[in-house]
Every structure is written in structure tokens, then in C-alpha cells.
Amino acid sequence: MIYNSFFKNTVLFLLLTVFSCGSSIKEKETRDKRQETDGTRQLSESQKEKTPLTEIKTGADNYTVYLPLLKNKKVGVVSNQTGILSNNTHLVDFLLEQKISVQKIFAPEHGFRGTADAGEHVVDGKDTKTGLPIISLYGNNKKPKPEQFAGIDVLVFDLQDVGARFYTYISSLHYIMEACSENNIPLIVLDRPNPNGGIVDGPILEKENSSFVGMHAIPVLHGMTIGEYAKMINGEKWLAKGIQCKLTVVPCLNYKRNLFYHLPVKPSPNLPNDQAINLYPSLCFFEGTNVSVGRGTEKQFQLYGSPFLPKSTFSFIPVPNFGAKEPPFKNQTCYGEDLSAVAKVKQLEIKWLIKAYQTTTDKSKFFTDFFTKLAGTKKLQQQIESGVSETDIRKSWQKGITEFKAMRKKYLIYGE
């Protein structure tokens, strides 16, 4: 009897173990399948900030998608120093290696090799490595002319954006899409992660304040990749006369917008590192004031200061350097704050702007006309001058941000 009871209990235990293991395996398989969607691996919260660059593939690295679209075509390329693959090969060199017939290069602000100062005139020329003609898309030629598209069947766009409305590469994108539409040239956008992709914040641009540093009614931080933004331009019919571009977006792989992304190349001369890129949207407001953001130092967009702010233990003296031939307050002592070690910001910070205004020696000379273009609205300057609290300023943005997010949702590739 004891033996029979022991035998029955043993068999029952083994059966329960088998069923339990089978159930666990099935649950794990179901979980794994849920995590594999659209070729992008979902990561746990603890992994999101630690994902190395090598796991994220840019649109340029997703070449099995776009190379067939370029075969036997005459190709133009819009790019600069950021247009590289994961092995550091530039897109133009890669296309030539693949026997793609690249005809010419179009370069945005800062030039093809990214060496020009902000706002500096960039002339047309030739790429010294490939001998290909370079056409500048800055100054008086922001939009390619029909004759500049001569001999081109398709245009490829590959630029690294940083997610701020006033970063001019998205304005160049608008004009390129418009020109492509008008000249019946298909556009292929090779997407890249947005290093500030998890943030949607700031005042919405009002149409009367449109300029090359802000063309459309979006917040300062739009939280989209450049490919998603291209889809929005097309979908919302923001091009002249509501025309639309023949657009193909080649997506990134293994990317979600809240993943940390380290840029392997400086996107422009005065954004030298991750800290500067993170602080840029917040500190760029100072470009419309009499306060320096560190041009002419080694910590561009990681500090701010001015001869008109109170003397303090921190100071710097701007001098001409790479990316700033004539920096504001050249050879003058500026007092302010060093932000190079502050924690990563997760919103558009205006506290430094407010503090600088409140402590400047002459408030009437603090803001310049450029500030309204950067802010996209006159209200922000008026609010700061009137002493409106930071909390209430932020509240005034919320309706616009909510409406923008609702519109933005249909153009997203990498989740919300």
C-alpha cells in the first residue's frame, strides 16, 4: 500500500512538472513574439538608457531597402559629415562602392564636411575625395533650382537632426521636398534616431513668425525623427500649394524614441558632445539675447554667460576657434553658469533664461529681434518680461502640445 501510494504520488508530481514546464515555455515563447514587432526589439525599462549604439541601425545601414531603388538610376545625395554607416563609411562613398551612379551632392548649412560657422555663406564646389560637384543649400539657394536637378532621377536625403524646431536641417528638408515635388523627383529619406526623441515640449510656432529657423506650427522639441517629420510635412500638405512629394522613408532598425543614442559624429561645429546636444534646445534661446552660449570656448551649448550678468565664481572668455570665427563677446569676460555636468534634461528648460533676464544689468537690452523667431511666438518674451512664473508659462503651452501630439501620432514609425 505504501509502495502504491508512493508510486502514484511520484507519477502525479512528474506530470505536474511537465505541464508546468510546458506552460512556462509557451508563455516565454508568447512573450518573445510580443517583443519582436516590425523588426524592432522591445527593451525593458532598465535597458532603455543602456542600449549601445551598435544595436541601433540607421536608415543608411538599412541598405537592403534602398539600394534596389537606386539601381540603374542617376542619383543626387543630400548629406554632410553625419551621413555615415556604422563602419564609418560615408554614404556617398558606400553608394559609389556599390556601383550606384551618384551625380552630385547637395550640402546644407555648415557645408558637406560640416566645417562652416552657423550662418556662414557656403559656396558651391567639388568634393575633394570623389570629385563630385557640391551644391550649397544655404544662403540664397535654400531650395534647389530646376537646373540643379538636371540629370538626376532620384534624390537621397541623409542628415542627422537633433529634434529642435530651429535646427535648420528640417527646414532644408522642407525645401528639398518642395523642389522634388515640383520637378517630379522621388525622394528617399534615410532615417536617423532623434537624440532628444523622447521630448515634446515648448511653445507652438505661430505662422506669422515663420522663418528658416522655424517653418511650421510645431513645438520647439517635436519628438520625431527626420523621417517621421518628412511624413508629417507631406501628410499635412505643408509644401507650397499643398503639393506632395513622392516620399520613401527608410526606417532605422532596433530603435525606439526613448532609447539613448550617442551621435558618432558632431552634427554641427558647435554641438561637440551628447551634453551639448541635450542642452541645445533649451540654451539656443540665448541666441536671441545678449547672452553667450559658449561659442568660442570648448563647451559650446554647455554654459551661458555675459558681461551684463552679475560677477560670480564662474567666468569664461570667448576667443575665435573652430566653428566660431567671431564669437559673441570675443575677448570679453562673461559671467554665468557652467552646465557641462548637469543631469540630462527631459524637458525644454527655461529656468536659465528666466534667471539671466532677472539678473541682467539692463533688461531693455536683453532680448533681440531674433528671439521671437526662435521662440516662434511673441508671448514667451512678453511672459518673461511680465514676471510670469515658469509654471504658468509651461501651462500656456499645454493646449498646443496636446493638439500637436494628436496630429503627430499618425506619422510615427517608432511608437509614441
Image (cartoon, rainbow, N blue to C red):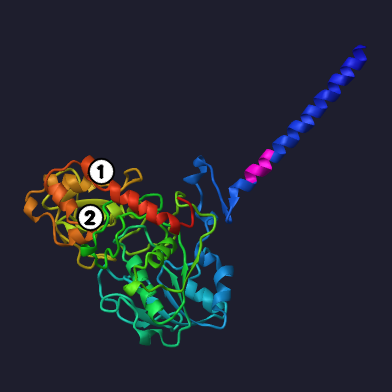
Determine whether label 2 and label 1 are within 8 Å by CB: no
Percent of width and height locating residue 278: 35, 52
Query: Between marks 2 and 1, how big is the CA–CA gap?
Result: 19 Å
Magenta region, residue range: 27-32
Horizontally, residue 364 falls left or right of residue 352, namely: left
Q: Which residue is drawn at 26% across and 78% down?
A: 140
Give neighbour class at mark 1: few <14, some 14-19, many 20+ (Cα, 10 Å): few
Front disc: 2 or 1: 1
Query: At 41% from the left edge and 65% from the top edge, which residue is drawn?
Result: 235
- Picture disc at residue 395: 1
**Label 2 neighbour load within 10 Å: few <14, some 14-19, many 20+:** many
50 is higher (above) or lower (below) than 54: above
The residue tagged 2 is 285
Instruction: Say which element carries label 1.
Output: helix
Q: Is residue 316 left or right of residue 256?
A: left
In percent of width and height, residue 141 lies at 29, 79
Q: Residue at x 80, y 24 (%)?
A: 13
Q: Seen in the image, is 214 located left or right of residue 384?
A: right
Residue 123 position in % (x across, y down):
30, 80
- Image position, residue 376 (x, y; %): 23, 58
First reached walking from the N terminus: tag 2 or tag 1: 2
Q: Does the magenta stretch include residue 29?
A: yes
Q: Is residue 170 above or below residue 56?
A: below
Amino acid at dot 2: Phe
Quadrant in which residue 149 is drawn: bottom left
Secondary structure mostly seen in magenta is helix
For the N terminus, the quadrant is top right
**Of the residues shown, which amino acid type is indicated by label 1?**
Lys
